[in-house]
Amino acid sequence: MDEKVFFNQGDVSVSNSRFIVDGQTYAMSNVTSVKSRVTPPDRGAAIIIAIVGLACLLGRGSVFVAGLIALAIAVLVWRSSKAKYAVVLNTSSGEKQALVSNDKTYITNVITSLNEAIVSRG
């Protein structure tokens, strides 16, 4: 049977016989299912910085200015925190997180390609 490629971008390739990511090769014959996983962003640091900034706003002079700066930093940290999306493979040996990215569309495309590869196996 000829190898049919469903996805090939950068260091990720999906065909009907294998899934290659970051130099690791997974045999599609061992993959029973695939799913996505979302890890929400960790915004704890932004919250702590904001609380410190709000407390500093109660002061005067340079303490007040430091509070404004802390709040600006908290907003930047909050906005830079992004969710992480993962491709999770289910195999006979268990569950394996194979690929992680901040780009939801990219992960969705890889999962769609993996599902097409599983279906094409028959």
Image: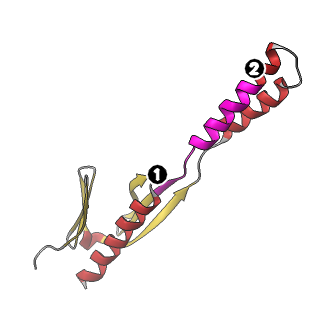
| Left or right: 108 in relation to 78 | left
> Dot 1 corresponds to which residue?
102
* Residue at far bottom of view: 122
| Left or right: 101 in relation to 2 | right
Residue name at image x 44 percent, y 58 percent: 86
Please determine whether, in this image, residue 122 is positioned above or below residue 118. below
10 Å crowding of disc 2: few (<14), some (14-19), many (20+): some
> Dot 2 corresponds to which residue?
66
| Left or right: 97 in relation to 41 | left
* Callout 1 secondary element: loop
10 Å crowding of disc 1: few (<14), some (14-19), many (20+): some
Image quadrant in which the C terminus is located: bottom left
Q: For this rendering, which residue is in front, 48 or 57?
A: 57
Q: Position of residue 44 (x, y in %)?
A: 67, 40
**Residues under numbered marks 2 and 1 in contact, where contact means CB atoms less than 8 Å apart:** no
Q: Amino acid at mark 2?
A: Ala
Q: Amino acid at mark 1?
A: Asn
| Left or right: 119 in relation to 53 | left
Q: Is residue 32 visible?
A: no
Image quadrant in which the N terminus is located: bottom left
State which quadrant residue 95 falls in. bottom left
Q: In the rendered structure, which segment of residues is drawn in magenta? A: 68-85
State which quadrant residue 56 falls in. top right
Residue 119's mark? none
Residue name at image x 75 percent, y 20 percent: 66
- Tally the numbered discs: 2
Q: For this rendering, which residue is in front, 122 or 93?
A: 122
Q: Is residue 31 visible?
A: yes
Residue name at image x 39 percent, y 60 percent: 106
Residue name at image x 24 percent, y 81 percent: 121
